[in-house]
Amino acid sequence: MDAPALRSPLGQSLPHESAHLHVSGRAAYTDDIPEPVGTLHAALGLSPVAHGRWLGIDLDALRALAGVVAVYTAADFPGPNDCGAIVHDEPILAEPPSAAGPGTLRYLGQPVFAVIATDRMAARRAAAHAKQVLRIEPLPAVLDVRAAHTAGDYVVPPMHLSRSHHPGGVAGAIHGAAHRLEGRFSLGGQEQFYLEGQIALALPQDDGGLLVHCSTQHPSEMQAVVAHALALPTHQVQVMCRRMGGGFGGKESQSAPFACVAALAAQRLERPVKLRLDRDDDFLITGRRHGFEFDWEVGFDAEGRIQGLDVSLIGHAGHSADLSGPVLTRALCHIDNAYWLPNVALNGYMARTHTQSNTAFRGFGGPQGALLTEVVLDHIARHLGLDALAVRQANWYGVETQNVTPYGQTVRDNVIAPLTAQLIDQSAYHARRAALQAFNDASPILKKGLALTPVKFGIAFNVNHFNQAGALVHVYQDGSVLVNHGGTEMGQGVNTKVAQVVAHELGLPLSRVRCSATDTSKVANTSATAASTGSDLNGKAAQDAARQITQRLAQLAADLWGGAVRAEQVRFAGGAVRAEQVRFAGGAVHGPDGQSIAFSALVQKAYVARVQLWSDGFYATPGLSWDRSTLSGHPFHYFAYGAAVSEVLLDTLTGEWRLLRSDLLHDVGRSLNPAIDIGQIEGGFIQGMGWLTSEELVWHPRSGALLTHAPSTYKIPTANDAPAVWHTALFDNANVEDSIHRSKAVGEPPLLLAFSVFLALRDAVAACGPAGCQPPLRAPATPEALLMAVEAVQAQRNATAAA
């Protein structure tokens, strides 16, 4: 092992680059940027109805209110009033009345107009007059996703993915199986609940340009949509983001209307304009994780092996497409999770309703698809009287055969069997299962549940051209290094990992490398920081840039040690020491025969010798392919794996429950930073647990108002919800693909580990009913949902006893 002075920062559990700022409260977010003199503030007037004809607006009444400087509607945008991420069906502000007819209001909370005022409270007070100044004819609203599906109203065309190895097709496989089951499953959505809400600050620049500070996961998209809406060339708009207080997908596409409104006002008034949403307005305006309704039918053998599976997935899209198409695609591509499904028919729909347009959320449809199969396997196990773990193991993907996904990608890195075997042993699963049965037999009120669930999650954007990244690396004369890349920091540690990669390449301690704000004027045409690709893509791009610099410096060092006396005399013609023999470590540059020079000293010589000390890097993920028309190809660079065991205690009289213990084992390849990776695993697990147990979204059945629009009505997990006993470990497994230092993505996959909590609750509910009962438990499994499921299986038990 290298001496500590020469040890690379790569693979070390080093602190997050902003940890000291986070804990001291000095980390600067968009709202902390000092406001220039004369800054104005914007607020949005929201639709008070879920669906209606917009007949007119009293602009004069708004303009007469105290502090109001201007009021804008969609008609004021010089370019298209649209911020649709893929399909151009998303107005920035509601389409206003015109000579062609009335405008249309699509959901309760839709931004209709923007008020610009001298201070934030004046803007908010004026915007709150929406009911008084808008003339509206209400229309019937579609709020139920199944009703929208019945009506055939979709935001994108339906998708169908099938594969069959049976002569009778999928239907023949199901009906020819020894056992058959069918059912429905209801899965709710989830609010991102980022700690920092949506915000944009737009500042006019020279010659009609704009600088927009925006809390966004996709600065390049914000740059493009602002330029589009304001009819500007893209180079006139600069977007910057130093850090976000969380994103989780909610700031990928849905930062757009706020950036556009702030930019419009700044352009028109030639003054800085800030738009920061109140938490309630953020809930009412923005979308969230797609909820799904599932109808399924399965055929299986006596060991629980699936012979055929037919699933209809009905996604709750909201009023526009947003990212619903790719979300549905990923849901379809994760129905298999860790299982070989020889005959499968998947039919996906994204139904349009008069609610907020749902969008990206950690996992991007993958968790929704994968959970359905876990629920189906749980049904199979209870029907057969088998341990659900045994049924899962019977359906694992194979290593040499039975290893092709329904969409045609070969699974060639499968470690789910050894990973799960390690977790079974470490968690004492079988002993605990026996102890749990004994506890339940002796406890009439409190019931325990236990479940082990696996994860196989594909890594890459399922739109091929997004799988690219750029970076800039600058080495200054004192040997310090500045890195800029296209990824955005939202607390997940991408800047820390990229800095570690660059420090490793240059042989420097991490303290000598700094990542600057994401800036569209430095690295252009970037992809969103999403799909768990932030470190993969930007780490590779930064590595490419750093290696170009080390090649130049290595050649300089080789020539110096080969006989050159003065740096300015160096000619790159090679010498006694070859460049490939030069090593960068411990803040110095080392030759093969004990030569050494401080990195900073070599950099100074390089500057004098006019050697380029900065470089740009680029990376495009290789080997990807996808045919959208057939839903087939090789959409993922590799798969990340994991498994979790969770044990719960349920009070069957109140529906309250506790998570007693969780054991998590997750595959991150060769970890770039184990501490950050474990933090992401545990954070994703808790966030997934919140989605599946407490975070219930409720709309008023008639008005369409989102009733759970604040922390008082929407329950996210707290520290008290973490398990009393919690073991988290990294599985030792280098990535088979040439990812950045053979690491694996860690942002999204761990969220699926929370399936173990939901299935453990289902296990506890089943303990209240007769053998083989199927608890009708929906997600989220709130106390109300748990009580309803408990009462249902108790009724089955009583009916069985009476018979």
Image: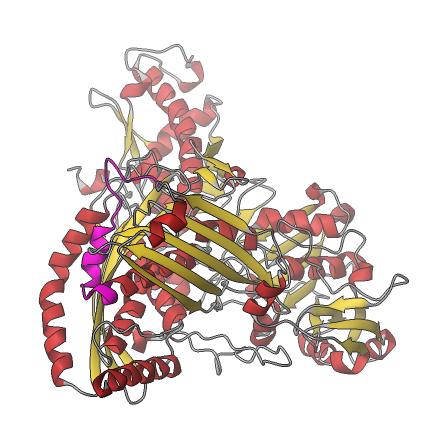
The part of the image, by quadrant, that contains residue 578 is top left
Q: Is residue 767 left or right of residue 323?
A: left
x then y, percent, for residue 239:
62, 50
Q: Is residue 9 left or right of residue 527?
A: left
x then y, percent, for residue 181:
33, 62
In the rendered image, which quarter contains the C terminus? bottom left
Magenta span has 395? yes
How many numbered discs sit on the rendered protein?
0
x then y, percent, for residue 60:
87, 76
Q: Which one is in front, 16 or 24?
A: 16
Task: Give me the residue at 43% from left, 25% from top.
Answer: 606
x then y, percent, for residue 283:
56, 72
Is residue 15 visible from the viewing direction of this image? Answer: no
Q: Which one is in front, 423 or 411?
A: 411
Q: Is residue 356 above or below residue 229?
A: below
The part of the image, by quadrant, that contains residue 198 is bottom right
Q: Which residues are magenta?
A: 381-404
Q: Residue furthest right?
A: 99
The part of the image, by quadrant, that contains residue 478 is top left
